[in-house]
Image: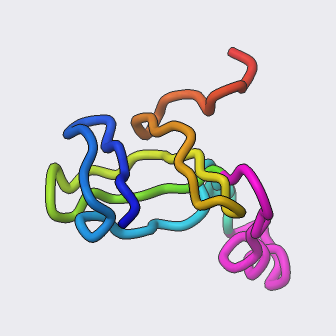
Amino acid sequence: MLLIPCPHCGVRPENEFRYGGEAHIARPSRPDDLGDQQWADYLYMRTNTKGVHFERWRHIHGCARFFNCVRDTVSDRILETYPIGASAPGAAS
């Protein structure tokens, strides 16, 4: 079983969490200005990275809060977790 370190509750088993999609996807500031293809790209297109990937998770059977997770999709190893709103690890401040 995968153990996930919630930044608010500590390490917990994976069955307490739900995957919430790719992290750091910003909603368009003016969605009415987007064409159909641009809107579809925002809604559905994701990087699907092989290797280090930034994800959003929710601790549904704990604090119920969302957080971000850096996970290696090849090894399924979690490298780091951090609260929503915090900068991505390695991002320029």
Q: Nearer the viewer, residue 35 or 93?
A: 93
Q: Which residues are magenta?
A: 32-53
Above or below, 11 relative to 36? above
Rendered residue at 76%/75% (across/down): 45
Rendered residue at 43%/40% (across/down): 84
Above or below, 6 relative to 88? below
Q: Residue 26, image x and y in percent?
A: 64, 52
- 79 vs 9, left or right, is right
Quarter location, residue 8: top left
Q: Is residue 37 magenta?
A: yes
Outermost residue, top direction?
93
Q: Nearer the viewer, residue 46 or 53?
A: 53
Q: Is residue 13 magenta?
A: no
- 20 vs 64, left or right, is right
Above or below, 41 relative to 10? below
Q: Nearer the viewer, residue 26 or 75?
A: 75
Residue 26 visible to the viewer: yes
Outermost residue, left direction?
62
Rendered residue at 72%/50% (across/down): 52
Looking at the image, how many numbered discs can be counted on the residues?
0
Rendered residue at 72%/70% (across/down): 42
Q: Residue 4, image x and y in percent?
A: 37, 51
Residue 29 visible to the viewer: no
- 87 vs 72, left or right, is left
Q: Residue 88, image x and y in percent?
A: 62, 33
- 2 vs 71, left or right, is left
